[in-house]
Image (spheres, helix red, strand yellow):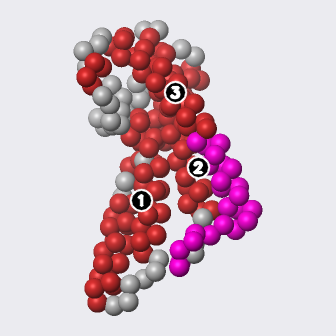
């Protein structure tokens, strides 16, 4: 495999791991927002922004963590047949499915960019009482989709290399979350 492809895979794997580990702590932010909302609702006047902000944090958590989950091979898989196949058969099926994933992510990113440009151009706001601007969460959405797309391409390169008999590792990176 060309060195630039190996460097790409290693770089994207590191980026996905770093962002995933950083974003995973946003769950505590969401929990804090929801706890504040619950306490406020029980004893005071509930804030109009808390539930929607918690939803935005959850969207960011989910989308920015997608590349990390993909890299760690942590997505749900139907192992009925997959577990009985040889490593080469699994890699062939993974190559086909990652191509489908890449096509889906390209379309999703295209729609996300279109929606984000609309939100930026027209100052789109939510229809809730709080009425926050939608552009920031849509920008985060596009970044998360792009990161997942880059990770899917890295997995495709890794699968093709594996089919050719070349194994691409993470060059001494610690942690047990590398794809198997």
Q: Residue furthest front?
A: 127
Report which residue position mark 2 lands on. Answer: 142
Helix, strand or loop for disc 3: helix
Q: Nearer the viewer, residue 166 or 117?
A: 117
What's the residue at 30%, 74% (across, down)?
35
Tell me where residue 70 appears, x and y as whole percent: 41, 36
Position of residue 97 relative to residue 140, above or below, is above
- What distance separates the C-alpha of mark 2 from that of mark 3? 19 Å
* Coordinates of residue 126 in the picture (x, y in percent): 58, 69
Q: Nearer the viewer, mark 2 or mark 3?
A: 3
Disc with the residue nearer the chain's start (1 vs 2): 1
Question: Is 22 contained in the magenta span?
Answer: no
Residue 102 seen from this side: yes
Which element carries disc 2, helix, strand or loop?
A: helix
Q: Residue furthest bottom?
A: 44
Earlier residue among tags 1 and 3: 1
Nearest to the observer: residue 57 or residue 55: 55
Q: What is the span of residues highlighted in magenta in the rendered image?
A: 108-130
Which residue occupies 47% across, 49% down? 63
| Element type at mark 1 | helix
Mark earlier in primary sequence (2, 3): 3
| Residue 23 on image: x %, y % | 42, 54
Q: Residues within 10 Å of mark 3 (few under 14, many from 20)?
A: few
Residue identifier under label 1: 58
Question: In the rendered image, which quarter is residue 74 located in?
Answer: top left
Q: Residues within 10 Å of mark 1 (few under 14, many from 20)?
A: some
179 or 74, nearer to the observer: 74
Residue at the spot of label 3: 100
Q: Is residue 176 above or below residue 62?
A: above
């Amino acid at each position: 495999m060309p060195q630039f492809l190996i460097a790409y895979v290693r770089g994207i794997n590191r980026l996905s791991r770093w962002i995933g580990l950083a974003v995973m702590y946003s769950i505590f932010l969401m929990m804090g927002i929801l706890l504040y909302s619950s306490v406020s609702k029980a004893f005071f006047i509930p804030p109009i922004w808390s539930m929607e902000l918690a939803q935005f944090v959850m969207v960011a958590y989910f989308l920015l963590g997608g590349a990390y989950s993909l890299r760690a091979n942590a997505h749900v898989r139907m192992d009925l047949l997959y577990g009985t196949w040889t490593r080469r058969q699994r890699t062939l099926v993974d190559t086909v499915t990652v191509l489908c994933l890449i096509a889906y992510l390209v379309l999703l990113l295209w729609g996300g960019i279109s929606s984000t440009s609309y939100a930026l151009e027209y100052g789109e706001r939510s229809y809730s009482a709080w009425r926050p601007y939608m552009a920031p969460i849509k920008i985060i959405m596009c970044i998360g989709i792009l990161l997942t797309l880059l990770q899917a391409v890295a997995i495709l390169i890794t699968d093709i290399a594996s089919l050719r008999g070349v194994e691409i590792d993470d060059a001494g990176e610690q942690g047990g979350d590398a794809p198997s």
